[in-house]
Image (cartoon, grey):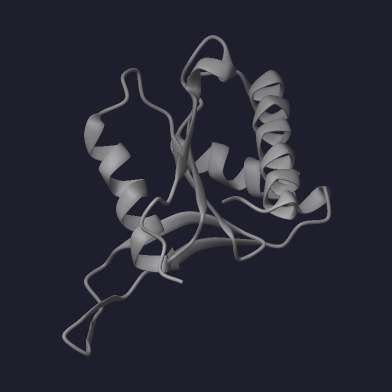
Amino acid sequence: MISERTEEIAKIIVHSAFTVHKELGPGLLEKVYEICLAHEIAKAGLEVKRQIDIPIVYDNIVFSEGLRLDLLVEDCIIVEVKAVEQVNAVWDAQIISHLKLTNKDLGFLINFNVPLIKSGIKRFINTRKKQ
């Protein structure tokens, strides 16, 4: 179950994505949207970390194999930013993996290369969260 606070943060993230898309439109590089989205979220008073390494822990061994998430907001919501013509199913698997490996509740895949940003926002809930 997603907490009320997490839902409030999620609304700010979505609003920030709308703001960035309205200002910049589609057609720019992913990194541009990531930087601007992080700025908008921070302007709203939330903590945002960019390009966070994700360790893989298996059999009590920590592997650092280059997994990285784009944005972590308030240490509870993962945001993966894309700027592509067509979203690939591998990115769904990417954010689901990130949610499971970090044990976070909620994630967003946001593709800015769309005419209407609402069609570029996909929400993911970690259904296998460890208690």
Judge left or right: residue 9 versus residue 44: left
Task: Residue at 68%, 30% (x, y): give it.
Answer: 20
Task: Residue at 53%, 18% (x, y): give it.
Answer: 26
How many numbered tags mark residues here?
0
Q: Residue furthest bottom?
A: 60
Judge left or right: residue 99 versus residue 6: left
Q: Is residue 114 above or below residue 88?
A: above
Judge left or right: residue 14 versus residue 51: right
Q: Is residue 39 above or below residue 11?
A: below
Q: Nearer the viewer, residue 3 or 107?
A: 3
Q: Residue furthest left?
A: 59
Residue 79 lies, in percent from the top left, at 51, 47
Judge left or right: residue 3 versus residue 45: left
Residue 40 lies, in percent from the top left, at 74, 43
Task: Residue at 31%, 19% (x, y): give it.
Answer: 86
Residue 42 lies, in percent from the top left, at 76, 53
**Hey, which quadrant is residue 80 in on the image?**
top left
Task: Residue at 36%, 25% (x, y): give it.
Answer: 84
Q: Nearer the viewer, residue 32 or 71?
A: 71
Q: Nearer the viewer, residue 44 or 77?
A: 77
**Hey, which quadrant is residue 23 in on the image?**
top right
Residue 5 lies, in percent from the top left, at 75, 54
Q: Is residue 65 above or below residue 11?
A: below
